[in-house]
Amino acid sequence: MNTLVAASVLSADFSRLGEEITALAASDIIHLDLMDGHYVPNLSFGYPLVECVRKLTDKPLDAHLMVTNPDAYIDALAKIGVQWISFHQETVYHPHRLIQQIKAHGIKAGLALNPGTPVESISALLPDLDFVLVMSVNPGYSAQSFIPSAIDKIKTLNALRKDVNPSLLIEVDGGISASNSELLISAGADILVSASYIFKSANYTQAINSLKGI
């Protein structure tokens, strides 16, 4: 498949959100980072902003739940019309159950891997997942520096999925720019999440296309 770019609105100018979303025409997915100030030391936004984004675009919405109680968010996000949801397995006792809850809504279910979380810890869940979100920064803030060890995780996942779940997608988030996107794609990444690289650029379309190598 062609590489997809998920534009993270965490770095958008919320005072002109409509214009910002319109300017993301070249992106494939809109990425939403929901933070609760507990699982990560930052707050971002909640349902009202997700509802606004849903009204502003027909693109798939990808919600990354950086929260201590992700199971409490699923029904509301499904009602709004989110198509992708990922959560951190450290936040729940029974990740398999939550994956099934997400999929019961017809939503793609993903697990997010922190830099300190090994791929092996989710190996038993790979057959049930639609995607894995590899964090190439520690979650919680935009504009952090890329952590190179993410490359090995992507390669490991790429090798594992061939045997256990060939349709599994690999998404990567954190410190991604045109300088490392080709390396990530070569390692096996299918979806590149970008926030500050896109929103700090003079031309969003050019920035998105540069991530795809266009």
Image (cartoon, grey):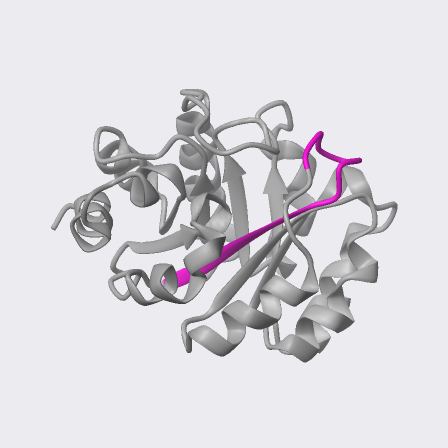
**Residue 48 visible here:** yes
Query: Where residue 181 sits in the image (x, y, percent)?
Result: 27, 37
Query: Where residue 140 sits in the image (x, y, percent)?
Result: 61, 33
**Residue 97 visible here:** no
Looking at the rendering, which quadrant does residue 63 occupy? bottom right
Q: Which residue is located at x 32 percent, y 67 percent?
A: 22
Magenta includes 37? yes
Residue 140 in the image: above or below residue 112: above
Q: Considering depth in this image, is 149 or 125 the residue closer to the camera?
A: 149
55 sits left or right of 211 in the view: right
Magenta includes 41? yes
- Outermost residue toward the front? 15
57 sits left or right of 62 in the view: left
**Which image quarter holds the N terminus?**
bottom left
Q: Considering depth in this image, is 94 or 27 the residue closer to the camera?
A: 27
Looking at the rendering, which quadrant does residue 138 occupy? top right
Magenta range: 29-42
Residue 90 in the image: above or below residue 93: above
Q: Which residue is located at x 28 percent, y 41 percent?
A: 185
41 sits left or right of 209 in the view: right
Query: Where residue 73 sits in the image (x, y, percent)?
Result: 77, 62
Q: Which residue is located at x 43 percent, y 29 percent?
A: 143
